[in-house]
Image: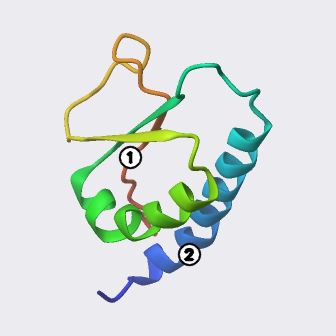
Amino acid sequence: MVLTKEALQGLLEITRGFEHLSQGVTLLKPIEISPILTVAVSPAFAAKWLLMRIDDFQTSHPEWDLRLDTNIRTVDYLAESIDIGIRDFVIND
């Protein structure tokens, strides 16, 4: 896989976002039951970027049950109990 110029520009910010997410998860108080973190992402984003990073997240946060909702349809985050959504974006010059 070769990243486009636009993808390289966005990669730093996306990586920072995941670092902030990780820090935020760390700050949450432990819940008595096993916490579930549901992330909605497009199938392309999951396959090309996210899946290769999930092991690192789960190693760092074994207390979280990570669930991915990979689809291209519009989702209702509250109704579907989705905690985080990451959608593809296009940068136009």
Q: Position of residue 67 (x, y in %)?
A: 37, 39
Instruction: Kindly identify the amino acid type of the residue bearing the numbered disc 2.
Output: Gln
* Front residue of this view, candidates 54 and 35: 35
10 left or right of 85?
right
Q: Quadrant of the N terminus?
A: bottom left
Label 1: which residue? Answer: 87
Q: Position of residue 56 (x, y in %)?
A: 54, 66
Which label is found at residue 35? Answer: none
Which image quadrant for residue 92? bottom left
Q: Is residue 91 above or below residue 7?
A: above
91 left or right of 76?
right
Which image quadrant for residue 28? top right
**Rendered residue at 43%/42% (across/down):** 66
Asked which secondary structure carries label 1, the reply is: loop
**Rendered residue at 24%/60% (across/down):** 44
Asked which secondary structure carries label 2, the reply is: helix
* Colouring style: rainbow
Q: Position of residue 9 (x, y in %)?
A: 56, 75
Q: Marks 2 and 1: in contact by CB < 8 Å?
A: no
The crowd level at tag 2 (other Cα within 10 Å; few <14, some 14-19, many 20+) is few
**Rendered residue at 22%/53% (across/down):** 43
Instruction: Kindly identify the amino acid type of the residue bearing the numbered disc 1.
Output: Arg
Label 2: which residue? Answer: 9
**Rendered residue at 58%/41% (across/down):** 63
N-terminal-most mark, 1 or 2: 2
Structural distance between the alpha carbons of marks 1 and 2: 16 Å
Q: Is residue 45 above or below residue 40?
A: below
